[in-house]
Image (spheres, rainbow, N blue to C red):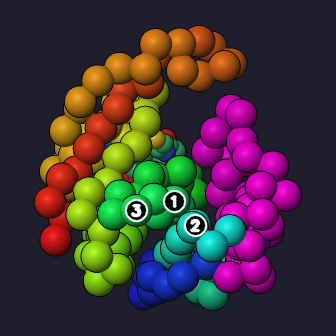
Amino acid sequence: MSEVVFRKMIVDDIDAVFEIETTSFSHPWSRQSFCDEMENERALYIVAVAEDKPIAYMGTWLIFDEAHVTNVAVLPQYRRLGIGQKLLRHMIDILKHKGICSMTLEVRESNFPAQAMYQKLGFEAAGIRKNYYEDTKENAIIMWLNDIG
Ligand SMILES: CC(C)(COP(=O)(O)OP(=O)(O)OC[C@H]1O[C@@H](n2cnc3c(N)ncnc32)[C@H](O)[C@@H]1OP(=O)(O)O)[C@@H](O)C(=O)NCCC(=O)NCCS
């Protein structure tokens, strides 16, 4: 694999990011959702790029001094290569410089790969949202990463 570069997401990345989304989730966001996020002042999206194409993306909403993770996904053929954790570390570095103190997210109870990645980066489980996911009524685990600065 060529060198992987991490940078802010731009409008021209939307097609590739939508492909990552549809290959990663059973109920993906619409393409329009990503267009809307590019206009959202509180949203911050980054991508990992290899061979001139986004292969992973991550989004957050900045709310006061907290960052709420909207999503993280890596194209299936690029998983288990450390890209997810590097993407998360890159996001944490950007957030630190913006004065953000903590990050939070929801993850499906059955999504062990994602939970393992978040734990590796220091996130801790802090509670459950019952029946959070509309499709399967699955519970969400709420995770926090505190004192990121
Ligand atoms: C979760 C996801 C983003 C991880 O991306 P990735 O690039 O494969 O992850 P990394 O290679 O950086 O792995 C980081 C750590 O996560 C854990 N991990 C990742 N995939 C795992 C798996 N399939 N099984 C167990 N642990 C896993 C490991 O602790 C790993 O560290 P290690 O390689 O030193 O063991 C990726 O699996 C994905 O896109 N999944 C579908 C979308 C999704 O579920 N997003 C999260 C929504 S909350």
Q: Nearer the viewer, residue 76 or 144?
A: 144
What x and y, as percent, mark residue 77? Answer: 54, 57
Vertical comparison of 132 with 119: above or below: above
Residue 21 visible, this orientation: yes
Please tell me the numbered disc located at residue 89.
Answer: none
Q: Residue at x 30, y 68 (%)?
A: 100
Q: Is residue 89 left or right of residue 146?
A: right
- How many neighbours does mark 2 have within 10 angstroms: few (below 14), some (14-19), or many (20 or more)? some
| Main SS, magenta residues | helix
- Assess whether residue 135 is covered by the magenta stretch: no
Q: Position of residue 54 (x, y in %)?
A: 61, 74
The residue wearing badge 3 is: 64
Q: Which residues are magenta?
A: 10-39
What residue is pinned by disc 2? 43
- SS at badge 2: strand
Q: Secondary structure at mark 3?
A: loop
Q: Which residue is mark 1?
A: 61
Q: CA distance from mark 3 to mark 2?
A: 12 Å
Tell me what residue is drawn at x 44 percent, y 52 percent.
68
Magenta span includes 36: yes
Check whether the beta carbons of the residues at disc 3 and disc 1 lie within 8 A of each other: no
Q: Quadrant of the C terminus?
A: bottom left
Apparent side of residue 40 relative to residue 109 in the rendered image (left or right)? right
- Residue 46 percent coordinates (x, y): 52, 74
Tag 3: residue type?
A: Phe
Q: What is the CA distance from the residue labelled 3 to the residue labelled 1?
A: 10 Å
